[in-house]
Amino acid sequence: MCLNGTNTANITERRSGDSSVAKRQRPSRRSLMKISFKLNNKPRETEIPGAKRFLDVLREDFGLLGTKEGCGEGECGACTIIVDGKAINSCLMLACQAEGKDILTIEGLDECGELSAIQHNFVKNGAIQCGYCTPGMIMSAKALLLECPNPTESQIRVALSGNICRCSGYSQIVAAVKDTAKGGES
Ligand code: FES
Ligand code: FES
């Protein structure tokens, strides 16, 4: 369903993680877990502390530095990834929660080394200033377009409301998402 309410629910879900469990913990050997999941369309299996933040797994264990950390508390959206088609704050996700999931990060969007349509439209519209929020913005927009290929401006703004841009480039960001929806592929 492509409704504002659905997107609002997603944002609530994204913010509802318990940040206390997501704080960095020094792993003990006993806390290591074997976890299998799909990452950017490739099957992955790894042994990591189950309580490690998935944001840190991406950056430290897989070297995927595109996913950023801003607040670390589920408030800024800089760390947004897509898990089973939904936008999720990876700073609030634990490694053990990745088991069996299909996970997409900003690195998974390029098409044979070329920018995807949504990335191209961010560049074309000048929707990138310092760029720190950009991966999270793009992943939130991508999740919206997966669920709702032809969103209204209000749906776009609701879907991006969990992402903060300190450079205040919201109009250009919304324009980039609209252009992507018009083009029919993200
Ligand atoms: S770093 Fe995850 S929401 Fe801010
Ligand atoms: S472009 Fe700088 S924070 Fe968004």
Image (cartoon, grey):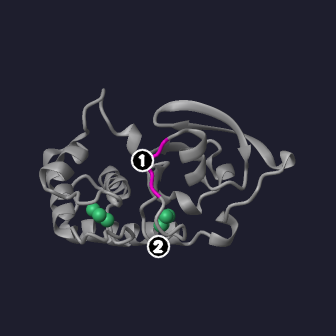
Q: Dot 1, crowdedness within 10 Å: few (<14), some or many (≥20)?
A: some
Disc tally is 2
* Residue 141 occupies quadrant: bottom left
Considering only vertical position in the picture, is 185 above or below 17?
A: above
Q: Nearer the viewer, residue 30 or 100?
A: 30
Q: Dot 2, crowdedness within 10 Å: few (<14), some or many (≥20)?
A: some
Judging by the rendered image, the residue that carries numbered circle 2 is 75
Q: Nearer the viewer, residue 72 or 34?
A: 72
Determine the secondary structure under disc 1. Answer: loop
Q: Is residue 65 magenta?
A: yes
Q: Is residue 82 left or right of residue 46?
A: left
Query: Could you say where residue 21 lies in the image, as x and y percent from the top left?
Result: 69, 66
Q: Is residue 180 visible?
A: no
Tell me the CA gap for discs 1 and 2: 18 Å
Q: Nearer the viewer, residue 39 or 28?
A: 28
Q: Main secondary structure of the magenta part?
A: loop
Considering only vertical position in the picture, is 159 above or below 51?
A: below
Judging by the rendered image, the residue that carries numbered circle 1 is 66
- Asked whether mark 2 lies closer than 8 Å to ligand 1, one says yes
Determine the secondary structure under disc 2. Answer: loop
Which residue is found at the position 68% from the left and 61% from the top? 24
Which stretch appears magenta? 64-68
Query: Could you say where residue 82 lies in the image, as x and y percent from the top left?
Result: 45, 51
Q: Nearer the viewer, residue 137 or 181?
A: 137
